[in-house]
Amino acid sequence: MVQKNNKPPAAAKIAAPAAPKRRGRPRAYEPEVALAKALDLFRRDGFAATSLDDLSAATGMNRPSLYGAFGDKRELYIKSYQRYRDDARAAMADIFRSDAPLRERLKRIYAIALDIYTGGESPRGCFTVMTAASEAVSDPAIRAMVLEGFVELDKAFAICFRLAKERGELPGSADPTVLAHLASATIHTIAIRARARVPRKELEAIVQGAIDVMCGAK
Amino acid sequence: MVQKNNKPPAAAKIAAPAAPKRRGRPRAYEPEVALAKALDLFRRDGFAATSLDDLSAATGMNRPSLYGAFGDKRELYIKSYQRYRDDARAAMADIFRSDAPLRERLKRIYAIALDIYTGGESPRGCFTVMTAASEAVSDPAIRAMVLEGFVELDKAFAICFRLAKERGELPGSADPTVLAHLASATIHTIAIRARARVPRKELEAIVQGAIDVMCGAK
DNA sequence: GGAATTTAATGCGAAATGGTACAAAAAAAT
DNA sequence: ATTTTTTTGTACCATTTCGCATTAAATTCC
């Protein structure tokens, strides 16, 4: 019932930028680490199939500590999802903002997506898609976040395609919004297929085909 | 605890093609109707978030009857999924087999898909996608069915595109397999978005854009 | 050292869950 | 009418689940 790293106090001060010197008993866990573990569990099993006992075991926090730190199961799920979105956004931001050629950017975006979705003994897929596909989406607050996730991705792709069009990488007839939806659709299809354990090679082939169509076949 | 239609025995004989004249106490439910109700519940909330009490209430069968008729919860889920697949296949078979122009066929396929995915206060999306995102990861038998579902759709689309290419509706450079994956991706993206309650109009716009790209913009 | 404060840990309790045992009920067969 | 067969319906059980109340521990401030 303890997080792996029972840090020596000295190391802790190094890790924590501004040693807070808080007043009561010190935490036995780092919230960021615990949240990452919770996220991983939710991604594996979904909201309903993940019990607080599972979460407690995985985070190394006992139940009351979980409540104290994150609130109830639903709040923890929401915070986990926000963390997921933050991580995913951070992983892709550079590429979305880079000025590499369209093909190259798309290729890199999908490579990162596949890193997030596949691998390990039970591939995690996309948490936004999983949440949309589950009962969690009937919660209005969660649904709003999921919708925001869709829109965010659509927009990022749309900006890509718009820029590429201006640069002459795409024909004048190309519609950036339509292409963006196709690019998102490709994200969604590989996320779902990854969950069904379709091998990464196959997913990469799907991605390659999609890129060819979106950029005009090589 | 009774299905709506407490059929008069006379009507029953009309409904049932070959009146079985079985031996014991007659069933108070029709298995097909009950399975449809169970499917609807599973589609709304998924496996884990659907309780046997929910299923019992929805089907009008009490728990022991559910077990007797369908087996345990997992078996009921599997049978519900098979039913879903059968229904979906039946709804699309005619169009996939028709020889209408490519654009027309795609348009009709997606219209039917949207009929299945949207509508009601909590749209159900695609059950194959839902299952892929949840139970398919850990349950090999379910995963196999889901994979089969993906392949079946991919193939149906591929046949469409291959035929269209032979007819000259597509340029020689078009790759039917790649286009089929894009068509499936479009199915997947609208299925997921539908669950997040994206209005049908928006989904239709996504579909229209995808069709334009796949068939060569109008 | 003692008070104050924050967290950990134990454990409880009410409700829900999946599954089943068993008796009552409803039909056909004898 | 009685028996046989099949299904229903009630009740139950063991387990799990979520959430919290309470106590013990660890640290800072005075």
Image (cartoon, coloured by chain):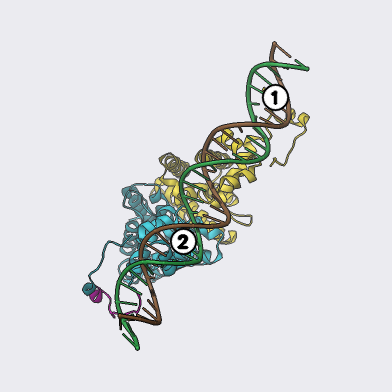
Chain colours: A yellow, B cyan, C green, D brown
Residue B168 in view, yes or no: no
Rendered residue at 31%/52% (across/down): B119
Q: Is residue A130 above or below residue A69?
A: below
Residue under pointer 1? A19
Q: Is residue B103 magenta?
A: no
Asked whether A4 or A66 is in front, the reply is A66
Q: Residues within 10 Å of mark 2 (few under 14, many from 20)?
A: many
- The percent position of residue A124, horizontal first and vertical second, equals 57, 52
**Parent chain of label 1:** A
Magenta span has B20?
A: yes
Seen in the picture, residue A104 relative to A202 is either above or below; the reply is above
Quarter-wise, where is residue D1 in the image?
bottom left
Name the foreground residue: B61 vs A42.
B61
Residue B169 horizontal/vertical position (percent): 35, 66
Q: Residue at x 49, y 46 (%)?
A: A128
In this rendering, the answer to whether B138 lies above or below A60 is below
Give the residues drawn in magenta, as a range. Answer: B12-24
Residue at x 69% of width, y 42% of height: A1
Marks 2 and 1 belong to one chain: no
Main SS of residues in magenta: loop
Q: For this view, does B26 lie left or right of residue B157?
A: left
Name the image quarter holding residue B55.
bottom left
> Residue under circle 2?
B181
Q: Is residue B177 above or below residue A77?
A: below
Q: Which x, y percent locates residue B23? A: 35, 79
Tell me the SS state at disc 1.
loop
